[in-house]
Image (tube, grey):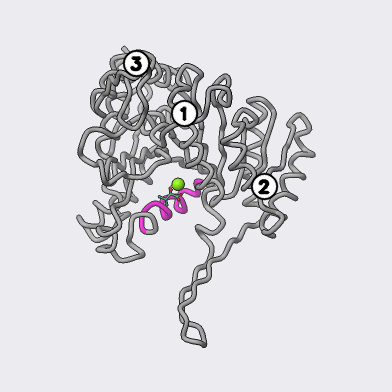
Amino acid sequence: MKKYTIAVLAGDGIGPEIMAQAVKVLRAIEKRGAVKFELAPAPFGAAAYFECGKSFPAETVNICDAADVILKGTIGLGHEETKKIPVDEQPERGALLPLRKRYNTYANFRPVVLPKSLAHFSPLRPEVIGGGIDIMMIRELVGGLYFGDKERGVDADGRRFVRETLEYNEEQVRRIVETAFATALQRKKILHNIHKSNVLKSSVLWNEVVDEAAARHPQVKVHHVLVDAAATYLCLDPGRFDVMVMENMFGDILSDQGGGILGSLGLMPSACIGPEKSYYEPSHGSAPDIAGKNTANPCAMIGSAALMLEMSLDMKKEADDIRRAMQKVFAAGFTTPDLPPLDGKPKMLSTGEFGDRVAAGLD
Ligand code: IPM
Ligand code: MG
């Protein structure tokens, strides 16, 4: 029997309650008898900081290093709570970005998927959605403004100033662009390259690298789209997109818009792929306002576990089964509070009930 060790970083806010559902689903897959998951929970985020003074403690680093793969929940607290943590230990800067950096998880896959049968979740009109939404957003995850040099100070006139650097070298661009072409080749052979080359020189270099890659992959039709225009098209005509590739900050913003056109960020899983180790997390935050209420939508978390099975553990069939099981719950008319009900009569499920039904659907 195959055996995998998974570092489980439940994190803050709704993280633990949605992670519990992903674990239920993994246990249901285990019951089929082909694989054993050794789950290694570890503190991460603000919870870890208050426990031991570090938001990515050495103990957690060791557990992640030793694991085959990492499954992460959500991190972060509300505005006031966050201020109790020193800026550099705040969970985004102190835990999440170091996690991305440590495993060099440069390729972030964010599927924006809504089958036609669930089109009523979307705020877009049915004629705009057509046959449903099926986009793979590919975001560069370890470069650009997020990781460039930063400086804060006071200038000669006594004014506070800040400077952040957007830096990419061609190799960093090439590897994510090649990932995008490889993905496009497996799908519709259409690639939308998202950029801002009318203003940013980083986009001029980025586009040069895309054009060079396009020459190596003539089977793929490349469209260059300015990031602001892409935001508009996502609302007006999402069907034109299949695979989209973009730098880190653009990807952060457009992928949240992806969640918006689906109807909820709770439907947005993600995969963060590195050369040796990868980790999987929902695209959304820790929603401190609803934490502990058992009302959060666990789909993005469960979907991230499915992506983990597919992309890191060679279990595509099981991943598809999980996604189908989630759709079946919705098709039966159930929703979570973040989504509109099918026919005006809400059949609302709690976080735990949703997880139970998905797990039961895998039997
Ligand atoms: C995301 C999140 C993170 C990001 C935050 C939590 C730092 O918004 O994964 O999209 O900006 O990358
Ligand atoms: Mg984001």
Q: Residue at (50%, 57%) from the top-left corner?
A: 146
Per the image, the residue denoted by label 2 is: 226
Label pair 2/1, CB-CB below 8 angstroms: no
Name the side, left or right, on which 248 lies relative to 72. Answer: right
Amino acid, disc 3: Gly
Return the x and y of residue 221 as percentages of the image width and height: 74, 32
Per the image, the residue denoted by label 1 is: 122
Label pair 3/2, CB-CB below 8 angstroms: no
Q: Vertically, is 332 above or below 216?
A: above
Q: Residues in magenta?
A: 94-105
For disc 1, the neighbor class at 10 Å (few under 14, some 14 to 19, many from 20) is: many
Gap in angstroms between the C-alphas marked 3 and 2: 39 Å
Q: Nearer the viewer, mark 2 or mark 1?
A: 1
Q: Earlier in the sequence, mark 1 or mark 3?
A: 1
Q: Which mark is residue 333?
A: 3
Q: Residue at (40%, 39%) from the top-left corner?
A: 281
Name the side, left or right, on which 282 lies relative to 237. Answer: left
| Magenta portion: prevailing SS class | helix
- Whether residue 251 appears in magenta in the rendering, the answer is no
Name the side, left or right, on which 310 lies relative to 139. Answer: left
Name the side, left or right, on which 261 lies relative to 197. Answer: left
